[in-house]
């Protein structure tokens, strides 16, 4: 048997999460965000499975080209726009749409010789202060885009900083800034990420842009409600490859970071940070063996972790171990590892075999 690490990706679950977006934002079109290899799930299989998506969002030209070369025909939007002028040629060649968030990008667009007009997603900074034009300049930039002759259509967009936290007043403020800036402007509008799809219906506008929720992770700080049921798409699993009985007082793993308080049965699982399992997962982080939770003990190493099997005497070498997914939300593992679901999912490495369920 080869090294037993696998990420099982259930494409039917992704479709079901997509359908939930459609229900929650019934009057909006859906840009499925598949950047970072569809948050680690595989951009081409995911985009292929989402035939009903109205568009796809990616972070780079290379990610967009990958979709086009796989035969994906829906609109594909470069969410960060282009990073230099030369990329404009491929934008036209591959029929892509671009975000324009800065004067520099605006310059690339004006300077490019385009053989076709393109769709531009013009980004306004409503308070996140990461990307986008300032609200007071927005109408003028939009007008200049219009008269440039390069643009077929302008979609007005912004991005939320705190939509995951329903108690944070910043989201309401960003909504108000957006509403004021775009009120008198023609064109489609887009604001909502996953959290806003769930929590801020007034932000749905013409296009919603869900990412993480398609993959079944809860984007909110609060638990999901009954009508918001997302299903995890990825189950990361491996197997127990060794078991050691150790005496009380013995330590486990690098740096002797965990020491047995009692005679203990330690299982070694073939998964490590070289696969994308978070190195900062602390003692006590749960893993699932035969549906039972057992605790990670000792430091995560590159290829292995160690778990405490003392209270699970039935566990045997070769048993399947679930690191997250079915029965163990990735958000929960992320929390105890001082991370977020996004980072864990996108961090699943190339050496982890992806297996697709349709
Ligand atoms: C990544 C991204 C999204 C999706 O965010 P989620 O929190 O994963 O839903 C939406 N819009 C933009 C501009 C993004 O970069």
Image: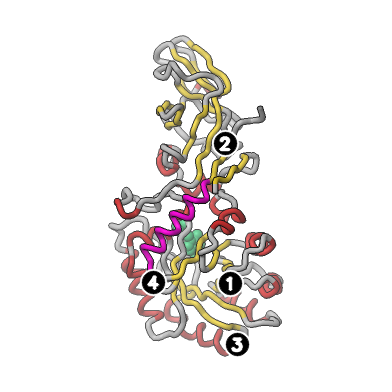
N-terminal of the pair, mark 1 or mark 4, is 4
Instruction: Name the residue carrying label 3.
Output: 148
Q: Residue at x 52, y 74 (%)?
A: 121
Give the CA distance from mark 1 to mark 2. Answer: 34 Å
User: Residue 98 shows which numbered tag?
Assistant: 1
Mark 1 or mark 3: which comes first in sequence?
1
Q: Which residues are magenta?
A: 10-27
In this rendered view, identify the residue nearer to me: 107 or 187. Answer: 187
Looking at the picture, how far across and down is residue 6, in whole percent?
Answer: 58, 37
Name the residue located 51 percent from the left edge and 83 percent from the top edge: 141
- Residue sticking out furthest to the left: 167
Which label belongs to residue 133?
A: none
- Can you identify the residue that label 2 sits on? 273
Q: Position of residue 197 (x, y in %)?
A: 38, 62
Q: Is residue 146 above or below residue 168?
A: below
Q: Is residue 294 left or right of residue 256?
A: left
Q: Which residue is mark 4?
A: 27
Residue sitting farthest toward the front: 358
């Amino acid at each position: 048997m080869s090294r037993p690490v696998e990420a099982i990706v259930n494409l039917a679950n992704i479709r079901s999460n997509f359908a939930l977006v459609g229900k929650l934002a019934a009057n909006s079109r859906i840009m499925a965000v598949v950047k970072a290899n569809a948050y680690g799930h595989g951009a081409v299989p995911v985009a292929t499975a989402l035939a009903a998506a109205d568009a796809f969002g990616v972070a780079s030209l290379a990610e967009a080209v990958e979709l086009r070369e796989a035969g994906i025909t829906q609109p594909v939007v470069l969410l960060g726009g282009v990073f230099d002028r030369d990329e404009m040629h491929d934008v036209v060649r591959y029929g892509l749409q671009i975000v324009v968030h800065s004067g520099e990008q605006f310059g690339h667009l004006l300077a490019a010789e385009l053989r076709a007009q393109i769709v531009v997603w013009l980004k306004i900074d409503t308070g996140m202060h990461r990307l986008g034009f300032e609200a007071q300049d927005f109408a003028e930039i939009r007008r200049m885009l219009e008269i440039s002759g390069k643009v077929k259509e302008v979609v007005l967009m912004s991005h939320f900083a705190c939509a995951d936290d329903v108690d944070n007043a910043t989201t309401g403020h960003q909504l108000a800034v957006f509403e004021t800036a775009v009120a008198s402007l023609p064109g489609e509008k887009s604001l909502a990420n996953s959290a806003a799809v769930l929590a801020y219906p007034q932000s749905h506008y013409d296009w919603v842009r869900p990412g993480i929720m398609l993959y079944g992770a809860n984007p909110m700080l609060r638990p999901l409600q009954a009508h918001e049921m997302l299903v995890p798409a990825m189950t990361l699993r491996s197997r127990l490859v060794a078991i050691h009985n150790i005496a009380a007082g013995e330590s486990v793993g690098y740096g002797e970071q965990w020491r047995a308080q009692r005679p203990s049965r330690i299982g070694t699982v073939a998964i490590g940070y070289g696969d994308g399992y978070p190195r900062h997962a602390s003692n006590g982080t749960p893993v699932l063996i035969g549906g039972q939770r057992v605790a990670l003990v000792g430091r995560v190493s590159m290829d292995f972790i160690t778990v405490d099997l003392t209270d699970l005497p039935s566990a045997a070498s070769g048993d399947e171990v679930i690191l997250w997914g079915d029965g163990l939300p990735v958000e929960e593992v992320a929390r105890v590892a001082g991370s977020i679901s996004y980072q864990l999912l996108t961090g699943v490495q190339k050496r982890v075999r992806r297996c697709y369920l349709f």
